[in-house]
Structures are given as C-alpha cells and as structure tokens.
C-alpha cells in the first residue's frame, strides 16, 4: 500500500467537491497552476476535462516534488493536458472545497456529474468490455485502481444518502472478498464520515481480500476507527442480528467477476438480506446476478443498484429487472470505451 494512500484518496474526493461547486461548461478554459499540496486541483482538472472543459495544467516546482501530485499528474501528462512550463493561473473560478462536503453531494444539480439515474443514452457494456476499460485506466492512463474504487464509493455513498435522507440511521455493509467488497469498504468510510452508524459484515477472511479491497480494509484502522467490523463468514447468527438492527444494507458481496451458483455463507447472506426489512443498495449489480446473463439463481433484491461507469447487460435481462430496483450510474473517472491511449480528454 502506498505510503500516501490516504492523502491520494482525499485528493480524489476533494477534486470532485471542487467541480461540484459549478458544473464545468463545454469549451470553458480551465488554466490551472498547481503548487505543492494541489492534488485536489489535479483531480478536478481530470474531471473537468471529462465534462468538456478546455483544460491546461501547469505544475509549479513544489508540485513536481509532491508524491501525491506526481501520481495524479501522470494521467494528465499522458492525455496531453499537462503543460511543460509552470506559468498561468487558476481561471476556473471555483472556490476550494468546503470541509466535509466531499461525501455529501446530492443527486440533483451538479451532483448528477457523479451519480445519476440511468438513462436510455447510457452505455451498456459487457463484463469483458468493462474490465478492458479498467485495465486501460490503470495501465494506459496511470489512474490507480484505488482511485477508481474511491470514486465508485463516492457514488455509492451519494445514492445511499439520497435514498435514506437526513437523520441518524444505521448502514450495514455486506462485503465479500473481491473488488466489490473494496467498493463497500470505501463506502463504509464515507458513510461514517457523514456521521452514520456503520457496521461492516465481512464474509471473507481479511487475509484473502483482493489487494485493493485489503487496502481499504486497512484504511478502516485497527481497531476500526470508521466503522464496526464483524467477522461474519462463519456465523449466520451474527448476520441475522446485524441485519435485524439496521436501516439499510449496502450489498458489496459479489461483483461482475461472479459466475456459477451461490453456496455456503454467501448464499445465506443473500437469503438473509432478502428476508430483512431494510432496503438494499447493490453495488454494480445485485449479488448473485451475472453481469452478462442476469439472474442465474438466488440474488439480492435491491431497491437501488449503483452501476459503476456503465450498465452491464445482465441488469437489463427480463428476470433481473425486478431485482435491480432503480438503476443509477456512478461516474468513476475511467476513459470512455472508444478513447485511445494518449488522446486528450481520456484521463
């Protein structure tokens, strides 16, 4: 795990907050000079470019030596947005992000830049096509997978908060062991940051989590500072008790990598989620569903599904529709499916 992981993820979140103040307009000039500690502005520059602004970024000498800026500048460098000379000034006209706002953007207005109800024009891509976009994001655009995961979690947090509204409520994150679990673990931090009571039900041994999920597990702290973490993979009673005491379930058990049939603790977890009176918000697709084929056996019945980047064909299959609830698209900052490496606007 990078030494500066928390700073990197905080910069990603705050970059989204900067843009949230006002949607970037198509063709609007964004000439930004970034000095040391300006990682949020580098993240914002990438987001503004994705939404049509004419972005040019200059790195001051201090920023070039800042490890967070170096990571976030590389996608801009590969996309041709980074100017070689440290001149110019910020002309986006946007204020710094307000404290604590990064997780709490509404779905209306500018918040729709980040998560929105799925529409007829939204892309539907197969699991294989989606994986290729993820690969290109990481390899061709130098966008860390943890940043993609953090952006997905922001969308999940926004959609869940929009569903549940204000007030004191308790969220249970049901997490498996893959990257879908990592999305849920990152969302747990976000919900906790907004003052919600959060319990993570972990269905896998922490030592068997995927690398990015493991990084987000470590970010919860030891002992966990952001959310209660419960080892639930061998205890149906623990699952049942937690689900009886919550107001909403975030389904992060299985993602697009799932195939076959549910069994053991995962099957019990899906059955208990469906038996619970709490509404379920599914991350990417309801657990137990095939991304390409749809319903192939028992699956979570969600009231909302937050699809990351694009819908998968399985969400639109006839038998799947009653299980997905309302489908939302969370923009995670990945390049579009047709964007070649090094093309301007692809980061």
Image (tube, rainbow, N blue to C red):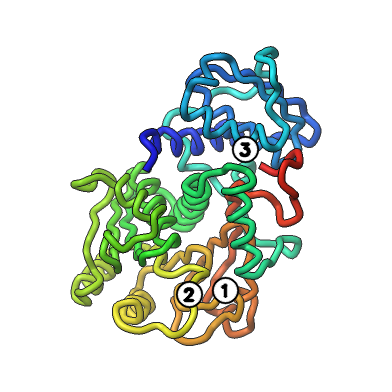
Q: Circle 3 — which element?
A: helix
When the figure is inspected, residue 44 is found, relative to residue 141, above or below; the finding is: above
Determine contact: label 2, label 1, CB under 8 Å. Answer: yes
First in residue order: circle 2 vs circle 3 = 3
Judged left or right of residue 37, residue 20 is right
Q: Which residue is mark 1?
A: 291
Q: Circle 2 — which element?
A: loop
First in residue order: circle 3 vs circle 1 = 3
Q: Which residue is mark 3?
A: 75
- Residue drawn at the location 67% of the way across and 24% of the way down: 57
Q: Quadrant of residue 228?
A: bottom left
Task: Name the spot of residue 317 as percent of width and height, x first.
Answer: 63, 80
Q: Which residue is mark 2?
A: 258
Label 3 vs label 1: CA separation? 28 Å
Number of other residues with Cα within 10 Å of mark 3, as a class: few under 14, some 14 to 19, many 20 or more = many
Residue 210 tag number:
none
Task: Name the spot of residue 96 as percent of width and height, x first.
Answer: 53, 24
Q: Quadrant of residue 327?
A: bottom right
Label 2 vs label 1: CA separation? 8 Å
Q: Nearer the viewer, mark 3 or mark 1?
A: 3
Judged left or right of residue 99, residue 70 is right
Q: Nearer the viewer, mark 2 or mark 3?
A: 3
Q: Circle 1 — which element?
A: loop
Q: Nearer the viewer, residue 128 or 46?
A: 128
Task: Name the spot of residue 4 as percent of width and height, x first.
Answer: 39, 33
Residue 23 seen in the current view = no
Number of other residues with Cα within 10 Å of mark 2, as a class: few under 14, some 14 to 19, many 20 or more = some
Number of other residues with Cα within 10 Å of mark 1, as a class: few under 14, some 14 to 19, many 20 or more = many
């Amino acid at each position: 795990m990078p030494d500066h992981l928390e700073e990197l993820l905080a910069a990603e979140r705050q970059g989204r907050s900067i843009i949230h103040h006002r949607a970037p307009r198509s063709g609007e000039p964004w000439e930004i000079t970034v000095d040391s500690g300006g990682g949020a502005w580098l993240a914002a520059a990438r987001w503004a470019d994705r939404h049509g602004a004419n972005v040019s970024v200059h790195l001051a000498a201090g920023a070039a030596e800042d490890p967070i800026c170096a990571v976030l500048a590389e996608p801009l460098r590969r996309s041709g947005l980074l100017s070689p000379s440290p001149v110019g000034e910020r002309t986006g006209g946007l204020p710094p992000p307000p404290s604590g706002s990064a997780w709490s953007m509404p779905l209306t207005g500018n918040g729709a830049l980040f998560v929105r109800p799925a529409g007829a024009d939204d892309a539907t891509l197969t699991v294989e096509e989606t994986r290729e976009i993820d690969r290109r994001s990481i390899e061709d655009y130098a966008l860390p997978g943890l940043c993609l995961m953090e952006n997905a979690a922001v969308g999940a947090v926004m959609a869940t908060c929009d569903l549940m509204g204000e007030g004191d409520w308790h969220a249970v994150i049901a997490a498996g062991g893959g990257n879908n679990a990592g999305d849920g673990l990152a969302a747990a931090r976000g919900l906790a940051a907004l003052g919600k009571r959060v319990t993570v039900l972990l269905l896998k041994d922490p030592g068997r989590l995927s690398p990015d999920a493991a990084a987000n597990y470590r970010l919860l702290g030891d002992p966990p500072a952001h959310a209660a973490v419960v080892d639930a993979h061998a205890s149906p009673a623990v699952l049942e008790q937690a689900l009886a005491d919550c107001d909403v379930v975030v389904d992060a058990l299985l993602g697009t990598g799932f195939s076959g049939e549910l069994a053991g603790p995962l099957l019990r977890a899906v059955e208990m989620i469906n038996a619970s009176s709490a509404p379920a918000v599914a991350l990417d697709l309801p657990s137990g569903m095939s991304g390409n084929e749809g319903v192939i056996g028992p699956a979570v019945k969600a009231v909302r599904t937050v699809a990351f980047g694009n819908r998968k064909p399985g969400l639109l299959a006839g038998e799947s529709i009653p299980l997905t609830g309302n489908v939302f698209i969370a923009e995670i900052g990945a390049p579009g499916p047709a964007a070649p490496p090094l093309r301007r606007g692809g980061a």
